[in-house]
Image (cartoon, grey):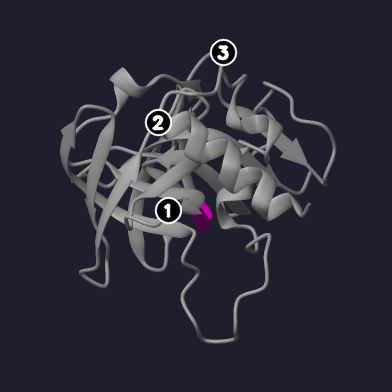
């Protein structure tokens, strides 16, 4: 039996309440970097991945997220007992709100809903230059636009030259290029920073 069939049966069972799941991380990584990874199954070049959704949440009802994609596609995303949710850190369904953006991976069911393995809420991946550094804040220049990056004590970390993540931000310098993965604050130019990638 293939992994895809196993995952489909597992998630279908979770949707109808017949499975007790330990979390979607058993099916794939919840690390924020995984949101930007390649699909885990073959999709024809140029074709949309039927098991991936992105967009903004327009409604929430009984474990279902109603999402409008950037291409105006309408999604119904089912959150199951096995869905892992990231919103700056691993979290629970009750932190998700109308107006949030998301990426979701899972399996498209026969009724057209997406049974989600993993959902990344408000996730952003920015390549920027540090314009200024303040107390618990990085002012970033991203393609000529200013973005305010908030460092969240106990959560934000830095990786220098691909070393393990540390909480020490002292090696960040004004003018340096960084990659920032974090959570957008909807309808603002602000993000809460999960990880900053920089050279030392």
Q: Which mark is residue 109?
A: 1
Residue linked to disc 3: 154
- Give neighbour class at mark 2: few <14, some 14-19, many 20+ (Cα, 10 Å): few
Q: Is 128 contained in the magenta span? A: yes
Residue where numbered disc 2 is placed: 16
As helix, strand or loop, the secondary structure at mark 1 comes to loop
Mark found first going from the N terminus, 2 or 1: 2
Distance CA(mark 1)–CA(mark 3): 38 Å
User: Distance of mark 2 from mark 3, alpha carbons?
Assistant: 37 Å
Query: In this orientation, does residue 118 appear?
Result: no
Residue 78 is drawn in which quadrant?
Answer: top left
Secondary structure mostly seen in magenta is strand
Measuring from the top left, give residue 15's x and y in whole percent: 41, 33
- Residue that appears at 18% across and 34% down: 60
Q: Which residues are magenta?
A: 125-130
Please state which of the two labelled residues, at mark 2 or mark 3, is closer to the viewer.
2
Q: Secondary structure at mark 3?
A: loop
Q: Which mark is residue 76?
A: none
Which residue in the rendered view is the most extreme toward the top? 154
Q: Position of residue 10 (x, y in %)?
A: 59, 36
């Amino acid at each position: 039996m293939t992994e895809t069939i196993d995952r489909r049966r597992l998630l279908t069972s979770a949707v109808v309440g017949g499975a007790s799941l330990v979390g979607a991380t058993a099916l794939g990584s919840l690390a924020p970097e995984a949101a930007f990874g390649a699909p885990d199954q073959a999709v024809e070049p140029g074709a949309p991945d039927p098991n991936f959704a992105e967009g903004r949440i327009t409604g929430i009802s009984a474990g279902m997220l109603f999402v409008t994609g950037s291409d105006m596609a309408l999604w119904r995303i089912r959150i199951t007992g096995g869905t892992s949710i990231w919103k700056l850190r691993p979290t629970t369904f009750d932190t998700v709100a109308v107006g949030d953006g998301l990426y979701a991976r899972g399996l498209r069911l026969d009724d057209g809903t997406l049974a989600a393995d993993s959902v990344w809420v408000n996730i952003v991946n920015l390549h920027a230059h540090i314009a200024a550094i303040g107390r618990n804040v990085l002012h970033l220049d991203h393609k000529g636009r200013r973005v305010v990056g908030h460092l969240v004590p106990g959560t934000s970390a830095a990786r220098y030259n691909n070393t393990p993540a540390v909480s020490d931000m002292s090696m960040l310098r004004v003018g340096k290029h960084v990659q920032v993965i974090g959570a957008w604050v909807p309808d603002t130019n602000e993000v809460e920073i999960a990880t900053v990638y920089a050279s030392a």
